[in-house]
Image (spheres, rainbow, N blue to C red):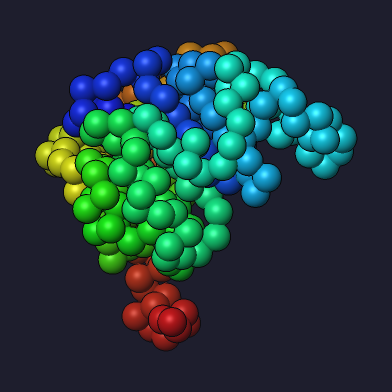
């Protein structure tokens, strides 16, 4: 989603100010991946229920908050202290991983974000703010976890291809770079279909995307020297396509013959 948003807005990954509303597992994992992808730690600020993370939050030193302490030390170098009003101000990108809304994120906070701002309201089943409210407040790009809204950001777009590519080359681990390769491929696939403010990444029913993601992940593992099985890109794409199509056909067959009941 971020890669596509950057393409649309013309902003650069090493220049955008990225904020995280919520500092749980989802925010921490996303922040780690984004920093690996090129977001500068000094451009990141994270906030939990007690406010922004910074070096003065010494209560975070102790387990189980020590992961937060790492980000308190490595991000927000100016020690900006405060709540959501401070967090959203002048932000290019805000990721929200808090609790189901609406009205968890206020329109007046969104209104203080930078020009061409991107807002990822990821709570389910109801995002922290309705997309139309965020747009009305000034956000240019809004994404949620909902399939009935534009720009659904769902991990089901990533993990099938990530695992398929990992298994097909027998990689010894899954690296951040492999996940980044998957994200770039999802954005590239959406670009082929025609990027827009309401179409950042493919939808889950675009089955052709999964083999592309698997291939990119497998090739990255080979490049990093952690693949036990070295294949060409063409070989990887063929293998992934065949295996994914077989699984899809098998599921359809079991469903059609009532061995699997639809919800």
Image quarter for residue 116? Answer: top left
Residue 49: where, in percent of width, then height?
65, 49
Can residue 90 be seen by looking at this rendering?
yes
Image quarter for residue 38? Answer: top left
When the figure is inspected, residue 229 is found, relative to residue 103, above or below; the finding is: above
- Name the quarter where the N terminus is drawn: top left
Can residue 164 be seen by looking at this rendering?
no
Residue, far left: 194
Residue 165: where, in percent of width, then height?
47, 35
Residue 34: where, in percent of width, then height?
49, 27
**Is residue 224 rendered to the left or right of residue 246?**
right
- Name the quarter where the C terminus is drawn: bottom left
When the figure is inspected, residue 209 is found, relative to residue 216, above or below; the finding is: below
Question: What residue is at 65 percent from the left and 19 percent from the top?
Answer: 74
Question: What residue is at 62 percent from the left and 22 percent from the top?
Answer: 79
Q: Nearer the viewer, residue 235 or 73?
A: 73
Question: What residue is at 39 percent from the left and 78 percent from the top?
Answer: 255
Q: Nearer the viewer, residue 78 or 188?
A: 78
**Is residue 71 rendered to the left or right of residue 98?**
right
Q: Across the whole image, how many numbered discs are drawn on residues? A: 0
**Is residue 1 rendered to the left or right of residue 260?**
left
Q: Nearer the viewer, residue 147 or 166?
A: 147
């Amino acid at each position: 989603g971020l890669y596509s948003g950057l393409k649309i807005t013309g902003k650069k990954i090493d220049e955008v100010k990225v904020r995280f509303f919520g500092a749980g597992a989802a925010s921490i994992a996303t922040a780690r991946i984004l920093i690996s992808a090129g977001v500068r730690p000094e451009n990141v600020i994270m906030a939990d229920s007690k406010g922004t993370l910074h070096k003065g939050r010494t209560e975070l030193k102790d387990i189980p908050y020590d992961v937060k302490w790492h980000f308190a030390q490595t991000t927000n170098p100016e020690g900006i202290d405060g709540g959501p009003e401070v967090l959203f101000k002048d932000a290019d990108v805000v990721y929200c991983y808090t609790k189901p809304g609406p009205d968890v994120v206020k329109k007046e906070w969104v209104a203080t974000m930078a020009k061409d701002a991107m807002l990822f309201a990821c709570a389910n089943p109801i995002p922290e703010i309705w997309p139309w409210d965020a747009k009305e407040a000034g956000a240019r790009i809004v994404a949620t976890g909902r399939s009935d809204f534009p720009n659904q950001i769902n991990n089901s777009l990533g993990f099938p291809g990530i695992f398929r590519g990992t298994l097909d080359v027998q990689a010894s681990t899954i690296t951040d770079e492999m996940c980044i390769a998957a994200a770039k491929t999802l954005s590239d696939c959406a670009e082929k279909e025609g990027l827009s403010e309401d179409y950042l990444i493919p939808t889950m029913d675009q089955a052709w995307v999964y083999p592309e993601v698997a291939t990119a992940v497998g090739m990255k593992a080979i490049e990093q020297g952690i693949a036990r099985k070295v294949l060409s890109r063409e070989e990887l794409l063929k293998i992934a396509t065949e295996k994914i199509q077989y699984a899809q056909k098998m599921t359809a067959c079991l469903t059609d013959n009532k061995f699997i009941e639809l919800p």
